[in-house]
Image (cartoon, helix red, strand yellow):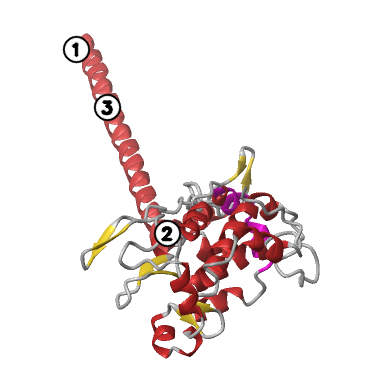
Amino acid sequence: MKLIQKQIIIFSGFIVFILFGYFAIGNFNSSQLGEMKTDIRTINTLSQSGIETDTGKRLETIANSGTNWGMSPFGSGKPLIEEEKKPVFKKPNTEWKTRTLSGITYVFGEGNPVGIAMDRSQIEAMNTPCGNDVSLIEKGICDAELGFMYITPEIEKHLLAALSDPNWSKLATECENHFRAREGPDALTNAQNDPSYLIFDRVFSPGFLDIDRFISIEPTTGLKMLNNHLTISLAKFVMNGMYDGASRGEPQPNPYGDCVDRYGQDISKNLVATTILYTHPLMEVKWIIHEVFKEYTIPFSFY
């Protein structure tokens, strides 16, 4: 009997111990679950109350500050890709294609074609009354002051030599500052108001130096025409960039040196020869060399 009572007591104690452990574990899990729910609510509350905004501000602050590995590309303002490079200078298109108009074929380098071309005596005859012939002036083949203008093979030779000169690329890439130094503070405004006003950006833009801009055909007379205004302006543009300027009237030498002198001499000489021969088609090139360039230090020789 005593043995049975002892066993009952031990068994009851064991049951109590198990029950106690069960409730203890349950309370512990409930407590942890409650804490987890509390943490989740806390996170949600913080997120809604601006923690994300604060995080964004922190990221911005970090981005705008330096690091041990160098300045952040965001903070420094540098783009993630390389800055856009200036377009590479495009060589002028110096091909003036042969064309046939009204049955007459025009070939570059041959002057005016047979049937249109004039001999020396005809040019001399035209040169006298030209200043009074309004119709010729209106057609652009005569100037009231300069006289009759006529394209010869010699003119086309010098024009092609000027536009095909490989040193245009050097002028565009190595002499930019030398040209801009002569432009003045109002250059951009002047260029915007006057399409014929030459500045660096205009001259070296793609297509500007293409030969088709310089030689055309006058539809009434059928004569080849030189865009003389453009040719003169381009010659002045190149010469103004030289160390002493084109007219010796610059107040001081070019502060960037003689880059244009080194690369632009032959270009300027050929452009000047082109425009003077056009307005004086019977003039000898050697006379031009002597008279036009005797005031400059540019060595001028074609032969």
The correct choice, above or below, for 160 with respect to 234 in the image is: above
Mark before the other along the chain sequence, 3 or 1: 1
Residue sitting at 35 percent across and 49 percent down?
A: 40
Tell me residue 27's x, y (percent): 32, 38
Identify the element where label 1 is drawn. helix
The correct choice, above or below, for 151 with respect to 97 in the image is: below
**Quarter of the image where one finds residue 282:** bottom right
Determine the CA span between mark 3 and mark 2: 110 Å
Q: Residue furthest front?
A: 121
Report the front residue among 182 and 271.
271
| Residue 64 appearing in the image | no
Identify the element where label 2 is drawn. helix
Read off the residue under disc 3: 16
* Amino acid type shown at disc 2: Ile
Read off the residue under disc 2: 211
Residue sitting at 33 percent across and 62 percent down?
A: 113
Label 2 crowd (10 A; few <14 / some 14-19 / many >=20) = some
Tell me residue 56's x, y (percent): 47, 56
Label 3 crowd (10 A; few <14 / some 14-19 / many >=20) = few
* Amino acid type shown at disc 3: Val
Label 3 or label 2, whichever lies nearer to me, is 2
> Residue 4 shows which numbered tag?
1
Report the front residue among 179 and 54.
179
